[in-house]
Amino acid sequence: MSRGIILVDPLPRTLDLIMAPDVRERLERLGDVVIREDRPMPAEQVDELLPETVLIFGQTDMPKERLAKAAKLKAIINVESNFLPNIDYQTCVERGIWVITPAAAFASPVAEAALGMALDLARGITKADREFRAGIEEYGLAGNRETFRFSGASVGIIGFGDLGRQLRELVRPFRNTVRVFDPWLPTEIIRSADCIPATLDELLSESQVVFVFASVTTENEGFLGAREFQLMKPGSAFLLMSRAAVVDFPAMLKAAETGHIRVATDVFPVEPVSADDPVRAMPDVLLSAHRTGGTRDAFFALGSMAVADAELIMRGLPPQLCRRADPATASRLRSKPVSVS
């Protein structure tokens, strides 16, 4: 194995899931690929391979003592899409080892689905369908007593990373006033996207539709709770599109159950959701099984972005498509690892 080893430890992904055949061929041209997909690669196998490993595709634990064994390592490419607290990010920076993820592959499909779900909450599309099938439909104005137009409605975006910025671009034709709350960003970035920087309370109290794209960190778990939901306008829409842990989930469901707000969620505290979970019977909550980002093309984009950047890195050039882990932020992230692709 003179070309260097590419250690592929991708669970919960597989190479067939994230790479079209031509992309897989490009990966194999970069080095000698060693794959373990039926379960995480055993520690003894990882340790044996590390001295000759040049690239890692996956979520392999890489503390400082392991990195010391990997003298030839150039990059760790996280294809799960969340930076996990299982890597010594500072040592990677000091060693010049790129730690990157192609998570932006999911931004466009998540934003697209979020817009569709927002239109549903505003116009009562699936609710009207259910009522029609039950024979209790109402026509014309009577059928629109509780609806509002998404066009021109005030929008709030909590978390302005890849997902939030994609959503902002999708809603431009709807001429919304858009407020953004993201304590990790300077106001200049928010204003450059034609958005209004806002405090959390301002955003919640002024927005008719609130999208949540925030990641879970050591500082924000459950930061959207009963007080925050009470700040929202009666009848406004709340869409949870990132991670369940950023909200007090029971408080969110109670706010929906009382009719104070309309709720849509693509994520849940425990997934898969149990068959007897009461959330399944809540008529005023729009439910999605953590599926908004997982389109066929998005998974293939995950692989093609990862391989394209790996090709650059192997040529001594910086990656261009994936997001790099920064120790100052990666160490704070606490998103629950994905278990289902």
Image (cartoon, grey):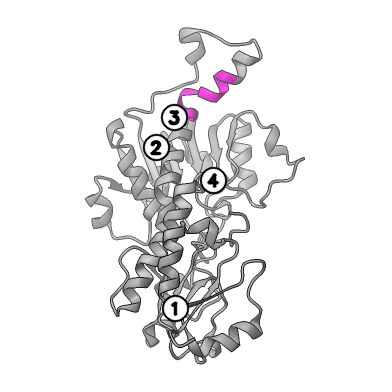
- Amino acid type at image mark 2: Ser
Which comes sooner in the sequence, label 3 or label 4?
Answer: 3
**Outermost residue to the right:** 276
Percent x, y for residue 63? 54, 83
**Drawn side of residue 116 relative to residue 312, left or right:** right
- Amino acid type at image mark 3: Leu
- Residue shown at 46% from the left, 64% from the top: 24
Percent x, y for residue 316? 29, 80
For label 1, the residue is: 31
- Amino acid type at image mark 1: Gly
- In the image, which is nearer the foreground, mark 1 or mark 4? 1
Which comes sooner in the sequence, label 2 or label 3?
Answer: 3
Magenta segment: does it hold 121?
Answer: yes
For label 3, the residue is: 119
Query: Which contiguous range is marked in magenta?
Result: 119-129
For label 2, the residue is: 207
Disc 3 is placed on an element classified as helix
The label shown at residue 163 is none
Which comes sooner in the sequence, label 2 or label 4?
Answer: 2
- Amino acid type at image mark 4: Arg
